Image: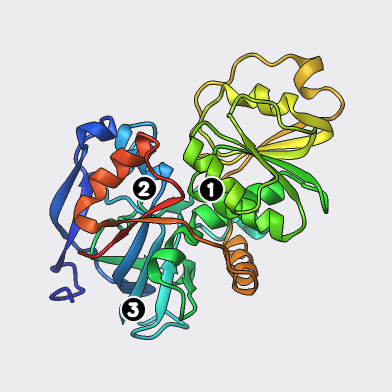
Amino acid sequence: MPSGTDGGATTLAWVVDHTAPAAEHPLEYGERPLEPLGPTGLLLDIRACGVCRTDLHLAEGDLAPRIRRCTPGHEIVGRVLATGPEAQGFAPDDRVGAAWLAGTCGTCRYCRAGRENLCPNSRYTGWDVHGGYARHAVVDARYAYHLPEGPPDEELAPLLCAGIIGYRALARAALPPGGRLGIYGFGASAHLTAQLAIGRGATVHVLTRAEEARRLALDLGAASAAGAYDAPPEPLDAAILFAPVGDLVPVALAALDRGGTLSVAGIHLTDIPALNYQQHLFQERALRSVTANTRADGRAYLAEVAQRPPVVHVQRYPLSRADSALADLAADKVTGAAVLVPD
């Protein structure tokens, strides 16, 4: 346990020392000051932290760092070591999850309308506040989730972003009951979202470049799996783009049936080429983005998967090899979800 929670303690953590391609190891490992606990804070002993493509965007400079020497990671599973005086509903040793959304203003028109993911003053774990590539973290109890006992820590971690954002992306895709869903890219979020959709009765077609990912998709119940630029075997009622590749937007739109919707799930996307109105958007095809998630999304998703637990395909890395995990993610060497666990 850290030596104190008054700002004088330290923890072992990775920080973004400079932005560069992941293969050049932009992260640095060592002791970092631990932020004060605060009134609503929870001090967590981190048991697992998922490695998300957003972390890669931060390390490589696609997302400008918002705090100096930021610790990435926003799929945190931990045990409570200490609570702030106003951290209601949590006690020491509770199993807790911390996700991407770390704070909102609570007063703007978006927050008041239940759309806190659009809050202009929103804050994010591993971007605005230090995240989970560490032994300990301080998180806000108001944005934390109670987690069930039972499932392994490393299998819960990917649910906290990959799962939640996939849940929201599926909602944004407006898939009708029993509909035909195309999934472009098949990493951590996609392999969880595919299972969610199949469990609801959808037919899922996966389009992705990695052969191993295509095999995993079929193992998890996808009706078909082909290359990222291939046409699915039937028109799609909805599609979700998980790969951060703008070139796939017209490909996915062209695969939609009349009235279909393409939902783009990533926080970063390369440039989208010119669209042809008749080919890509006419006949009421729709293109939608996905921005973060609300706490209601997180609670609803965790409740649904508690009733129908997904198979979480995990590649484990010791915390001391977080830079290798990011490099493997960048090189498409991760099938399913990469997760950091204590050494």
Specify whether residue 214 is in view.
yes
For numbered disc 2, what is the local secondary structure?
loop
- CA neighbours of label 1 inside 10 A, class few (<14), some (14 to 19), many (20+): some
The N terminus: image quadrant: bottom left
Counting residues from the start of the chain, the first of labels 1 and 2 encountered is 2
Instruction: Kindly identify which numbered label has been placed on residue 80.
Output: 3
Which residue lies at the image location 41% right of the left edge and 57% below the top edge?
A: 314
Task: Please give left or right for residue 214 compared with residue 339 in the image.
Answer: right
The C terminus: image quadrant: bottom left
Give x and y (percent) for residue 28: 16, 45
Counting residues from the start of the chain, the first of labels 1 and 3 encountered is 3
Residue contact between numbered discs 1 and 2, judged by CB atoms under 8 Å? no
Give x and y (percent) for residue 91: 38, 86
Q: For the residue marked with disc 3, what is the amino acid?
A: Val
Mark 2, residue position = 127
Mark 1, residue position = 216
Q: Which of 285 and 334 is in front in this view?
A: 334
Give the Cα distance between marks 1 and 3. 35 Å
Task: Indicate which label's residue lies in the foreground, 1 or 3.
Answer: 1
